[in-house]
Amino acid sequence: MEDIELGWLSGILEGEGSFTWGAKKDRGVYGLPVVKIGTTDLDICKHVQALLGGKIRTDPAMKAGWKDQYRLQYQGERGAEIMRILYPLMGKRRQRAIKNCLDKWGARPWLREGSKNRHAKLNADKVRTIRLRYSQGSITAQQLGTEYGVTKGAILFVIHRKSWKQVP
């Protein structure tokens, strides 16, 4: 992301965004960092989406004469990553909110994705090997699971990029 886009994004989130500790249950534990933006300007949400990805949600207008509300939300490790990038560009109030979230997130290492999770049985190299071997048709997901000490379902999530998405 270019500096000008980063500056634009920080300005929009300073005014139209929020940095919170969400109460959603994730992997059996409540709470994770959440970055939200909500606006009645669809073009603004589309620009944020172009920079960060995600799916725009639409809340219909509640009353006649009101506008629809468009929103994007990033949570968990993605939310924390966005917070870390934007922290130095934000005002004091937003920095306090971000620091609060990241402090809570940092105290919970078992929630990390991929090899950042201290309980991970796989790493990026193993994931690449699993995908390659499975694509060659020489081994089943069940066999790979047994070999790597994980379930068949975990292997299928790796193969279909439901997990370890960050690994090419």
Image (cartoon, rainbow, N blue to C red):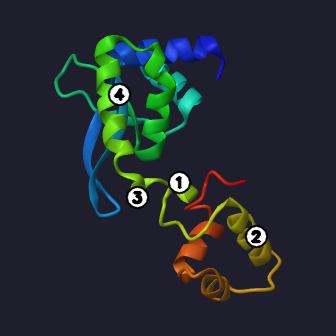
* Residue occupied by mark 3: 110
Name the residue at 55% across, 62% down: 162
Q: Is residue 14 left or right of residue 155?
A: left
Q: Earlier in the sequence, mark 3 or mark 2?
A: 3
Name the amino acid, label 4. Answer: Ile
Q: In the image, which is nearer the foreground, mark 2 or mark 1?
A: 1
* Residue occupied by mark 4: 98
Q: CA distance from mark 4 to mark 3?
A: 20 Å
Indicate the secondary structure of the residue bearing disc 3: helix
Q: Earlier in the sequence, mark 4 or mark 3?
A: 4
* Residue occupied by mark 2: 129
Q: In the image, which is nearer the foreground, mark 4 or mark 1?
A: 1
Name the amino acid, label 1. Answer: Lys
Q: 4 or 47: which is nearer to us?
A: 4
* Residue occupied by mark 1: 116
Q: CA distance from mark 1 to mark 3?
A: 8 Å
